[in-house]
């Protein structure tokens, strides 16, 4: 299921490939805990994610305000990482490790969704990663020949033949080893035994926005009070490690369809299921090639805004729980995610036990702008669903339903039903201020021979899905490592 695009839905609860974390109770979400999947497999979360390829907006990278990390600086790395099925142009590259392709099949519900968005003033956009993000169109996905293209298949597998690479699996990193304030290696557990590896040049962490700060804290790098509370000797008092967590808040709405053309209908029929399987095996087409979004609209929820602040996902199925059983009716889903997050949370160790999951606090909807974006965005979703030609496919608004009318109703609905869209960033934030964890070369500030290269270094979450930006960031990070090694 890892390699079948729609198979991401089978991986939510698979603890053999998924850490399946949970947040702390979120006060802004009525005390609910937020289920937080993370990849526990080669390729990390790129091997279990929803495959949606979105880079973000130019203003995101320019807004970081860090020399060398503006959009124009990163565009060559976006192109380098990409093998764009449409071919190369000013925005896209070919021949890179990560396949990026159109979904092989159009769908009449998607076409109606895009047309209805156009009727509401949202322009058609066939490339959300080109000259502009705003508009409505089909997603592209990180696939090649109908199969998932991940960090494991695109980067790691071709490199396995190199003499200077050794991969250790079933290995759990427990701490970074230090010689004074210089990183000297890493300790890890493997099948009950403790091992150490030592670094001739430097140690690079790529554990993602939860596990990189967790490993730093376990190693004595983090807020002094937190470390001492858990009996860890501080190597470096770094108050920003694990702080500034950002993510996109995500709210789903469900709709009953007037025609039996949804995946719900396909999966209710054994004959249709057989046809879907055969079509995928023989042609690499059909519903199994669909990512976590089929079509999308990037919209401004208020006319005075200069860029999109909300992302609307359309998928041609519905299920009460992500990864759960499909609804027993013809159904589809319209979901909303705000793009420019302001809320900041944290990631902190619970104890000195490296195998204990970290404590995660998102603090969603803690800003007035986020709450307003969510409410206005959900109201737009309802307008779109009731706009021809899409309205002709709507038999019923199943959830939230007509009882939700006022802004207070919409806010309450979001608090009770919204959760993560799996885009955590910024817990080892790049910058030069006192709380920044890494500098512009991704080196941990205050220490030697230690870098972090993953989503945790983003100063702020980008406007959209984060996988594409992580690939570009890592390509640039690799160049920084190589350049520093050549100077040494």
Image (cartoon, rainbow, N blue to C red):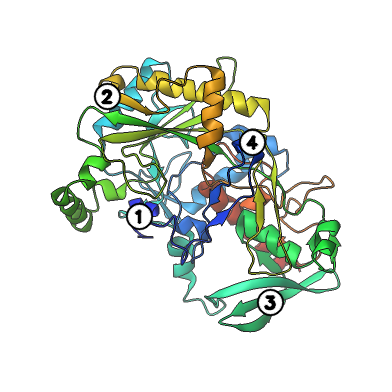
Name the N-terminal-most of marks 3 and 2: 3
Check disc 4: other Cα within 10 Å, few if <14, some if 14-19, many if 20+: some
Residue beneath the point at 21% across and 44% down: 266
Question: Quadrant location of the N terminus?
Answer: bottom left
Name the N-terminal-most of marks 1 and 4: 1
| Residue situated furthest bottom in the rendering | 193
Residue beneath the point at 55% across and 15% down: 303
Residue highlighted by disc 2: 395
Find residue 187 and name its label.
Answer: 3
Residue beneath the point at 23% across and 54% down: 280
- In the rendered image of this protein, does residue 127 appear above or below residue 279? above
Residue highlighted by disc 1: 7
Give the x, y percent position of residue 10: 37, 56
The number of callouts visible is 4
C-alpha distance separating marks 3 and 2: 58 Å
Give the x, y percent position of residue 169: 52, 75
Find residue 28 and name its label.
Answer: 4
Give the x, y percent position of residue 420: 54, 43
**Residue 207 seen in the figure:** yes
Name the N-terminal-most of marks 1 and 3: 1
Find residue 150 and name its label.
Answer: none
Q: In which quarter of the image is residue 227?
A: bottom right
Check disc 3: other Cα within 10 Å, few if <14, some if 14-19, many if 20+: some
C-alpha distance separating marks 1 and 3: 34 Å
Q: Is mark 2 on a helix, strand or loop?
A: strand
Q: Is mark 4 on a helix, strand or loop?
A: helix
Q: In which quarter of the image is residue 110?
A: top left
Labels 3, 4: front one: 4
**Front residue of this view, candidates 436 and 90:** 436
Labels 1, 4: front one: 4
Q: Are marks 4 and 2 in contact (CB under 8 Å)?
A: no
């Amino acid at each position: 299921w890892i390699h079948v695009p729609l198979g991401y839905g089978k991986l939510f609860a698979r603890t053999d490939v998924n850490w399946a974390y949970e947040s702390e109770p979120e006060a802004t979400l009525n005390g609910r805990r937020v289920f937080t999947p993370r990849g526990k497999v080669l390729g990390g979360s790129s091997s279990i994610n929803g495959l949606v390829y979105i880079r973000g907006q130019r203003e995101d990278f320019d807004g970081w305000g860090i020399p060398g990390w503006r959009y124009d600086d990163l565009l060559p790395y976006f192109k380098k990482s990409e093998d764009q099925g449409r071919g190369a142009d000013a925005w896209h590259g070919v021949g890179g490790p990560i396949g990026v392709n159109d979904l092989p099949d159009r769908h009449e519900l998607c076409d109606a969704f895009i047309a209805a968005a156009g009727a509401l003033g949202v322009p058609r956009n066939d490339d959300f990663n080109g000259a502009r993000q705003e508009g409505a169109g089909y997603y592209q996905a990180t696939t090649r020949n109908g199969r998932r293209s991940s960090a494991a298949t695109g980067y790691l597998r071709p490199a396995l033949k190199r003499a200077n690479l050794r991969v250790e699996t079933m290995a759990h990193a427990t701490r970074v080893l230090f010689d004074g304030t210089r990183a000297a290696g890493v300790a890890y557990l493997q099948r009950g035994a403790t091992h150490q590896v030592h670094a001739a040049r430097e140690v690079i962490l790529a554990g993602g926005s939860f596990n990189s700060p967790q490993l730093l804290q376990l190693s004595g790098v983090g807020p002094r009070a937190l470390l001492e509370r858990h009996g860890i000797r501080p190597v470096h008092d770094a108050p920003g490690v694990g702080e500034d967590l950002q993510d996109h808040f995500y709210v789903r709405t469900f709709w009953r369809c007037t025609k039996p053309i949804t995946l719900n209908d396909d999966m209710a029929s054994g004959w249709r299921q057989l046809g879907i399987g055969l079509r995928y095996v023989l042609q690499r087409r059909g519903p199994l090639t669909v990512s976590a979004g089929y079509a999308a609209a990037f919209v401004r929820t208020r006319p005075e805004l200069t860029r999109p602040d909300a992302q609307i996902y359309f998928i041609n199925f519905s299920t009460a729980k992500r990864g759960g059983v499909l609804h027993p009716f013809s159904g589809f889903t319209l979901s909303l995610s705000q793009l420019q997050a302001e809320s900041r949370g944290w990631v902190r160790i619970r104890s000195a036990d490296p195998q204990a999951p970290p404590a995660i606090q998102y603090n969603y909807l803690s800003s007035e702008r986020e709450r307003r974006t969510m409410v206005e965005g959900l109201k737009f979703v309802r307008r779109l669903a009731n706009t021809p030609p899409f309205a002709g496919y709507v038999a019923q608004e199943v959830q939230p339903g007509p009882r939700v009318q006022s802004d207070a109703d919409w806010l309450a609905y979001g608090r009770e039903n919204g959760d993560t869209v799996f885009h955590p960033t910024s817990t080892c934030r790049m910058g030069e201020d006192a709380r920044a964890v890494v500098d512009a070369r991704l080196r941990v500030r205050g220490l030697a021979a230690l870098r972090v290269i993953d989503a945790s270094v983003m100063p702020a979450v980008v406007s959209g899905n984060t996988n594409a930006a992580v690939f570009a960031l890592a390509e640039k990070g690799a160049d920084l490592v190589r350049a520093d090694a050549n100077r040494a």
